[in-house]
Amino acid sequence: MTDTMYQLLAVIIYFLGMIGIGFYAYRRIFNLNDYMLGGRSLGPAVSALSAGAADMSQWLLMGLPGAIYVSGLVEGWIAIGLTIGAWFNWRLVAPRLRVYTHVSNDSITIPSFFDNRFKENAKILRIVTGIIILVYFTFYVSSGLVAGGVFFESSFGYDYHLGLLVVGGVIVLYTLFGGFLAVSYTDFVQGTIMFLALVSVPIIGVFVTGGIGETIETIKSFDPNLLSLTATATATGVISSLAWGLGYFGQPHIIVRFMAIKSAKEIKQARRIGIGWMILTLAGAAATALVGVAYFQKHADVKLIDSEAVFIQMGQILFHPFIAGILLSAVLAAIMSTVSSQLIVTSSALVEDIYKAIFKSDADQKTYIFLGRIAVLVIAIIAGIFAWEKSDTILNLVAFAWAGFGAAFGPTVLLSLYWRKFTSQGALSGMITGAITVFVWGNSFLSDYLYEIVPGFILNLIVAVLVSKMTYKSIPEVEKEFDETLRLLKEEHE
């Protein structure tokens, strides 16, 4: 059996495992809450790794190692910003969102929470939020499908379109049948594979490059700046990189995991698992790049095909072809976990937040589950059409969309949870301000100096507070739910 066949066999086994999890989850779905939010039944480990895997796409195994391989640890500021942002997201958003969404009419999506949270004149806010999620995530899903097609093309030499159809088909199969539970369980497995892969490659690689000391000396002899966080850094560059962490508060496919955990009591444990996983995988990605620098300096006869392929190529060099295939599955896991999470959130936005809000439908649960599955299929087909021709525009939208969601939704989520006098008018005004600011700033020369999420987030916050102060009026039901949330949180901590 050739090396390629061994690797392909490992990938096929991985695909079959994901489909099997999807059908297992299918048997546990009885209503729309189960399909869209897993019946709020996730344990801390599944919640933590599911959130992490949904967050970290192919950037973790390809983009970050590639950037550090070329420029050094100065590219690690984004990883630091993301880790800090993720910790604050678990600490500030997770407990309150889990309790408040349950108290406020058992909201199962972020847009429906906004609607239920504000009570009056909030339907338009729900619809606008749902439309933003639908549009942005459809393109986001497209970028993931593009990555899947490129992966098969570069790893096995297969046609790009065949790779796109295979990856897209497997994702749709387990997401369509298993819903949020399938996405969460597969994310847990995918997160575990990503962790093991990113830990094993640098550990084995260090032995091959002569140990830690010799590896460091080899890197220093090539370029000592590669080991420095500050040597080539600029103040605005560091601020922009750290600002990526602000995006977490507004990413629907990540914070929905907080709503699905069994209880707020388990969030502390989930946070520790999630942040531990994140620190180790990000450190593994950085270490993989640096070990790669040392290896290719020591073995001048071996050429690195592409800096972003340093993880893949090191895995193929260091391990048996079947194990290398499992490492290739880790790249697929990073792609698929993010796409499936975005797909289920987009489906829920279409059914729960747009269809139900506009048509005021009162159908039975089986009908809603059916509509949710149809939505997954339709969105995947549209995303596949966008992805059919490889486009840098779609891939570049990922960073832009992260800023868009973070600036539009981040302050809205935080103020909804922590300020009882926050109004629907303030939320809508701030959301529009944040989204427009990101669009204008991100498409101007200003984005070369400062990441657009910074002005977008700040202006959203200012406008939301000012408009809320001007439009506030006491709504007894809102006050009651806010106080009930605080009471339940206090009980959870006692």
Image (spheres, rainbow, N blue to C red):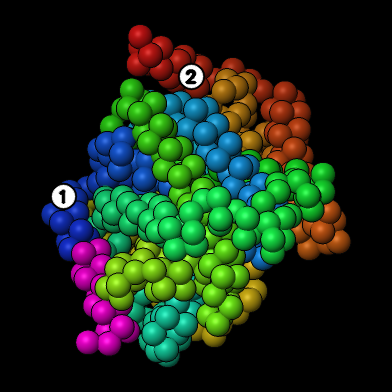
Whether residue 451 is situated above or below residue 88 in the rendered picture: below
Q: Which residues are magenta?
A: 1-19
Residue 5 in the image, given as x and y percentages of width and height: 27, 84
Q: Which residue is mark 2?
A: 482
Q: Is residue 120 above or below residue 147?
A: above
In the depicted view, which residue is nearer to us: 186 or 372?
186
Instruction: Report x, y in % for residue 206.
Output: 47, 57
- Decide whether residue 243 is among the magenta residues: no
Residue 99 lies, in percent from the top left, at: 39, 26
Q: Residue extending furthest left?
A: 27
Q: How many marks?
A: 2
Identify the residue at horizontal 39%, vertical 85% (top origin).
156
Looking at the image, residue 241 sits to the left or right of residue 288; the answer is: right
Identify whether 346 is placed above or below 412.
Answer: below
In this view, the mark in front (2 or 1): 1
Q: Amino acid at mark 2?
A: Phe
Crowding near the residue tagged with mark 1, few <14, some 14–19, many ≥20 C-alpha atoms within 10 Å: some
Q: Residues within 10 Å of mark 2 (few under 14, many from 20)?
A: many
Q: Which residue corresponds to mark 1?
A: 28
Verify whether residue 3 appears in magenta: yes
Residue 358 visible, this angle: no
Mark number for residue 443?
none
Residue shown at the point (64%, 59%) measured from the top left: 219
Q: Amino acid at mark 1?
A: Arg
- Which one is nearer the viewer's eye here, 400 or 160? 160
Confirm or deny contact between disc 2 and disc 1 (CB under 8 A).
Answer: no
- Please report the residue visible at 27 percent of the width from the left and 51 percent of the height from the top: 185
